[in-house]
Image (tube, grey):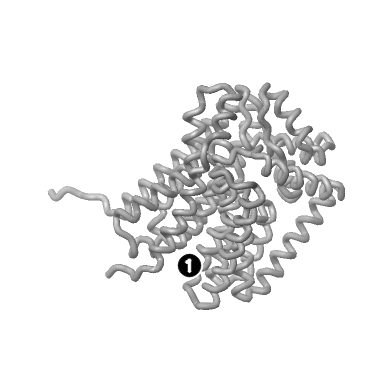
């Protein structure tokens, strides 16, 4: 009898299922290992969400935006000097206040697994048969996000939903665009795309979502929440200039230039100029009739260019752009191109994880000192990734 062989499409689906199973396994593992806030003297990003939710139910939600208060709470839990400040808009507080309704480990598992499931569903709709390669490329930032419980899956899913609905010419694209107010800088490129395309109903709906969510946040938390938020944002800006944040984990132009010794003001100016030029490029591409899947990919990549606050886990949101370009990449690249692209994406999304694993045996003070002396390799890798993608898209498709 002839030996039966699995078809490439079947192999691709099996590989995708295996990779996805590993992601969810990691979520379960970390939910069990860290069942409570501060367990094992460790705090991850999700714990900041959980603490903010607890502060709401204690009637102290505005104190979440105080760096001194958050530092005291977190340092009492783990016994060392590092802490995570809170700078999210009040709309995200509406999500955070729901989390303490469950024990920390379960809340982490539910939040991270549900947002990952939504993100992967959107990614599959965009990437089609190329999903397995997108999953491999994004494995480092997806793994980072599963281990710290960040909200990158949620923002990535909203970005992907905008792309899906925009491609279908649906006004409903305004919903995910408006909901990106939870991380507004990640919606800039998408907003520019809607503006350049003359999608006025989409923009009107997005504005309505922002207005309604702002009103809801005010009703639930009080008008003082906005003054507290603005003060927290001011403190975050000052902290960025004093290199409080771990720049080696950032993938922004600001982090790259600052790591090379540029003054904060200079680095921030260049970051702003790059963001403006990238936004202008979206407008020009839309006006010139570039295929919509390519202009939407540009919008996704631009959204990850405009802000100095961009971490390795935020590379998850670029998955939307990669998924949109999957077919173009397949017919325009050689094996060497794909290896180079994969390596750059892995560095952009995985350098922070590699550095953290390499420093795991050091004391907190030594890890902090080591982090300050480490370059933002992920930032350089992201810029090179965009340059390589630009070069690839200028080629004619292979026969």
Q: Closer to the camera, 96 or 330?
A: 330
Q: Closer to the camera, 10 or 363?
A: 363
Pinpoint residue 69: horizontal percent, then vertical percent.
78, 33
Give the class, few, some or many, for how many residues have Cα within 10 Å of label 1's Cα (few <14, many ≥20).
Answer: some
Where is residue 397, by image quadrant?
bottom left
Image position of 114 (left or right of 183): left
Residue closest to the far right: 223
Give above or below for 188 relative to 87. below
Pinpoint residue 308: horizontal percent, then vertical percent.
62, 50
Q: Is residue 220 visible?
A: no
Disc tally is: 1
Q: Is residue 371 visible?
A: yes
The residue lying at 68 percent from left, 44 percent from top is 241
Where is residue 17, by image quadrant?
top left
**Residue under numbered circle 1:** 294
Pinpoint residue 141: horizontal percent, then vertical percent.
50, 44
The residue lying at 53 percent from left, 69 percent from top is 167
SS class, disc 1: helix
């Amino acid at each position: 009898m002839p030996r039966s062989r699995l078809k490439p499409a079947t192999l691709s689906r099996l590989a995708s299922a295996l990779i996805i199973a590993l992601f969810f396994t990691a979520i379960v593992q970390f939910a069990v290992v860290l069942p409570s806030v501060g367990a094992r003297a460790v705090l991850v990003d999700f714990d900041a969400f959980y603490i903010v939710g607890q502060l709401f139910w204690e009637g102290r939600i505005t104190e979440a935006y105080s760096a001194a208060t958050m530092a005291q709470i977190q340092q009492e839990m783990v016994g060392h000097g590092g802490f995570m400040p809170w700078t999210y808009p009040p709309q995200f507080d509406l999500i955070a206040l729901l989390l303490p309704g469950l024990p920390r480990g379960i809340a982490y598992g539910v939040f991270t697994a549900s947002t990952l499931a939504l993100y992967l569903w959107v990614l599959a709709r965009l990437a089609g048969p190329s999903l397995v390669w997108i999953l491999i490329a994004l494995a480092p930032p997806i793994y980072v996000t599963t281990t710290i419980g960040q909200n990158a899956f949620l923002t990535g899913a909203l970005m992907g939903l905008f792309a899906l609905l925009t491609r279908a010419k649906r006004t409903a694209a305004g919903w995910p665009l408006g909901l990106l107010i939870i991380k507004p800088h990640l919606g800039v490129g998408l907003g520019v795309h809607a503006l350049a395309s003359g999608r006025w109903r989409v923009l009107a709906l997005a504005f309505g979502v922002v207005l309604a969510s702002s009103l809801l946040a005010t009703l639930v938390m009080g008008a003082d929440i906005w003054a507290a938020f603005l003060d927290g944002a001011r403190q975050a800006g000052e902290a960025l200039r004093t290199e409080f944040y771990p720049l080696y984990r950032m993938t922004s132009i600001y982090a790259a230039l600052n790591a090379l010794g540029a003054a904060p003001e200079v680095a921030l100016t260049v970051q702003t100029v790059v963001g403006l030029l990238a936004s202008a490029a979206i407008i020009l591409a839309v006006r010139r009739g570039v295929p919509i899947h390519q202009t939407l990919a540009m919008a996704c990549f631009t959204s990850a260019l405009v802000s100095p606050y961009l971490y390795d886990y935020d590379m998850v949101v670029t998955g939307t752009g990669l998924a949109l370009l999957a077919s173009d990449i397949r017919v325009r690249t050689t094996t060497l191109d794909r290896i180079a692209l994969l390596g750059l994406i892995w560095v952009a999304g995985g350098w922070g994880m590699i550095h953290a694993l390499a420093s795991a045996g050091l004391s907190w003070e030594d890890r902090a000192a080591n982090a300050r002396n480490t370059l933002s390799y992920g930032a350089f890798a992201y810029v090179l990734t965009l340059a390589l993608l630009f070069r690839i898209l200028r080629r004619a498709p292979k026969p």
